């Protein structure tokens, strides 16, 4: 996997893929900067009059429902449909998926349009896939074991890659499972690090044949950047800008030195 | 008051209260980060379909009218009404209150919904409460004496806490008056420091029984953070990020060393 | 020209002009901070109910179509019309002008309202003025010579100042042409540096009698700030904040030491 991550980063840097983002109003600046720092070319556009055209010229689509309104939801649905028609890969970040009925319904509608990858925290992922009528979610013990079993099952059922992020991140296509232990706790005190993870995965998704590799690559790069950025870091303000610096400086040597990914046994089947 | 501020900060850190923000498009990222840095959990959501639900799960509501449109104003009114019904505390930041007729009317409508606290600069506060049909505002000499008298009168009349910020800040519930002399002039060269003050007060409001203490605590924490951040500071770009670092590092010792609050004699009655 | 730039900066600092921005959702915070750093007073407001009032109290208007929707486009048109009626100077930043039909049409509508200055990259400027029915644009060789000829012709035809930014920047009123060689390549890895250039030109436009001088002044100040900010700079996160610091510190000595502007021979007529 390490070789694949390094290769994927090189391809992003070389191709500077266009990544179209319809995202929330809190992180537009942050995620555009993260995409530029890793070497991609962000497009931030959400008007219904042009999202289909933007999908048409982009290499991947990122949909983040963090501050959806009825209007932006319609743009997201249109963009996701267009991505489906044009066979463009796209990733869904169902921010706060189960928190309100409006978010629940909106994210369900997006899930039905078959994203290539879904990334969220354990509560968002559980809520998204449980509400979809798929039975019980991660149980209250919320152990890694039950989370793992749940996302493998759902990834297989929905034929998509699922990434659950937290202290450890888990990525699966329903068959293979990877655990990522990069990152630093102070990252939770910066708004939008989850959204940034999703955007970065979008950059890798634009150049990788295998969505599983894209998801792992995005999470590893952000995690390593967070580890390096948090060294002697006085606080989350400084961390936020250093994250961008470290994404910009990310290279083969850094990945080789710090990558912390393990392939888990396939617990299902 | 110093003891109460320290206690309030400890409670924010311990409870990580949910603070729901409907704010302007310039400062969403900044204020979410400030809330995370101080230890609270920000929710940024403004769709009319979900603001009432968000108020329901939040511990306090922050409404900032800096870039209101007809749509967001309706969300704000709905959220404020819900807060009233559910007895959730909320704070109004009437940005540019008297600058255009649209802002004047919009902020009046919000004021009528009885915020727990209003925070603004002298011109915003005067405009807001004068337009409400309450007679003359702060006179043209704009002295601290006339400002003080005005806000005490209005706070009593409207039964709310009023915070006027500037070179010195004044906070009153109509009875007690506190003057805060923390802060640094370079803060005026960073966009949204006023909005950040309001958001931080929202965090304290979520955990304090007494709105007066919440307002003083928020202004003291931001003011001290600004003083520390501006030491040998090359400019407002650096100041902006250091403000977040210092909010994150704020603790009992820092407050004890730098707090500059005085209780003024009650000039009314 | 150097003397005029220094004078213009002094006037911005002294007058703190009100600069009204209707801009894209990615850069609202960044451009407001850049305007504060250079010494101007930003207003960020886009509600159709108040944009005309805001133009009325402002000294210049900045319109940036980076994330236009049907609604914000209507606000922009209303604001631009008001600026025309009130003889207030305004600048158009036609972000991604030719990328989608929606942007093409929207930017054409704004161009017809006769901005005082248009600033964009070579592809945006070509697309904007070519679509306007003015024949062929910058040819595929995209040489500086052909770019120069094109913008001189269009500036004369439309009676406006055109600024094309890139590795070198070119500014012309159709008669005089200036070439600016300040700046640093890492600036392309920070989102919104083009938008920031436009906003800064707006600040100078608010105080300069000559739009040509305003455009050159804004580009020189940002370019110099970028050069200084990129010294030993670890990455684009740090660069972004240092840009604000350097704009704040910009003064006569810095301009004298680093300005790199040349007047080109007038190749047309």
Image: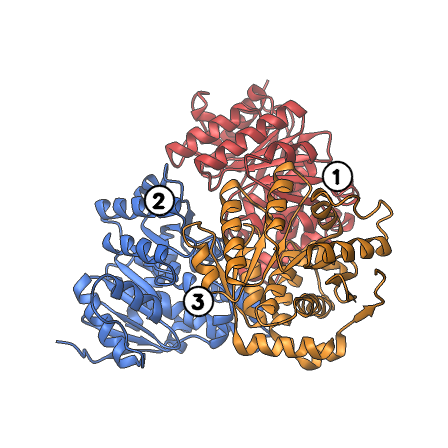
Chain colours: A red, B blue, C orange
Element under label 1? helix
Report the front residue among A166 and A76: A76
Real-space Cα separation, disc 1 to disc 2, in angstroms: 43 Å
Residue to which mark 2 is pinned: B75
Find residue A95 and report its horizontal and vertical position in percent: 48, 39
Residue B75 visible in the snapshot: yes
> Which residue is outermost to the top?
A269
Real-space Cα separation, disc 2 to disc 3, in angstroms: 33 Å
Whether residue B217 sits left or right of residue A184 in the image: it is: left
Residue to which mark 1 is pinned: A8
Find residue B70 and report its horizontal and vertical position in percent: 38, 46
> Which residue is outermost to the left?
B269
Element under label 2? helix
Q: Residue at x 77, y 66 (%)?
A: C176
Residue A229, quarter of the rendered image? bottom right
Element under label 3? loop
Residue B164, quarter of the rendered image? bottom left
The disc label shown at residue B250, or none: 3
Q: Are marks 1 and 2 in contact (CB under 8 Å)?
A: no
Q: Is residue C157 above or below residue A98?
A: below
Nearer the camera: disc 1 or disc 2: 2
Q: Quadrant of the N terminus of chain B?
A: bottom left
Label 2 marks a residue whose chain is: B
Find residue B172 and report its horizontal and vertical position in percent: 24, 70
Whether residue A23 sits left or right of residue C190 in the image: it is: left
């Amino acid at each position: 996997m390490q070789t694949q991550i390094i290769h994927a980063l090189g391809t992003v840097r070389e191709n500077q893929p266009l990544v179209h983002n319809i995202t929330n109003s809190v992180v537009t600046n942050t995620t555009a900067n993260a995409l530029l720092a890793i070497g991609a070319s962000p497009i931030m556009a959400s008007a219904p009059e042009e999202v289909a055209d933007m999908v048409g010229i982009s290499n991947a689509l990122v949909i983040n429902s963090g501050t959806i309104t009825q209007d932006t939801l319609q743009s997201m649905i249109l963009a996701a449909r267009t991505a489906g028609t044009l066979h463009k890969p796209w990733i869904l970040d169902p921010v706060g998926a189960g928190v309100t009925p409006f978010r629940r319904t909106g994210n369900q509608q997006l899930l039905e349009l078959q994203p290539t990858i879904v990334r969220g925290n354990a509560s968002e992922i559980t809520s998204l896939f449980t509400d979809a009528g798929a039975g019980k979610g991660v149980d209250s013990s919320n152990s890694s074991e039950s989370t793992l079993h749940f996302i493998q099952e759902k990834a297989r059922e929905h034929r998509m890659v699922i990434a659950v992020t937290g202290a450890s991140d888990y990525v699966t296509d329903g068959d293979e499972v990877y655990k990522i232990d990069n990152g630093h706790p102070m990252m939770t005190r910066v708004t939008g690090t989850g959204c940034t993870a999703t955007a970065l995965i979008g950059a890798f998704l634009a150049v990788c044949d295998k969505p599983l590799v894209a998801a792992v690559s995005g999470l590893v790069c952000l995690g390593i950047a967070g580890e390096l950025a948090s060294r002697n870091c006085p606080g989350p303000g400084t961390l936020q800008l250093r994250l961008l610096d470290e994404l910009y400086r990310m290279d083969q040597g850094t990945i080789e030195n710090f990558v912390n990914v393990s392939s888990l046994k396939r617990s299902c089947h």
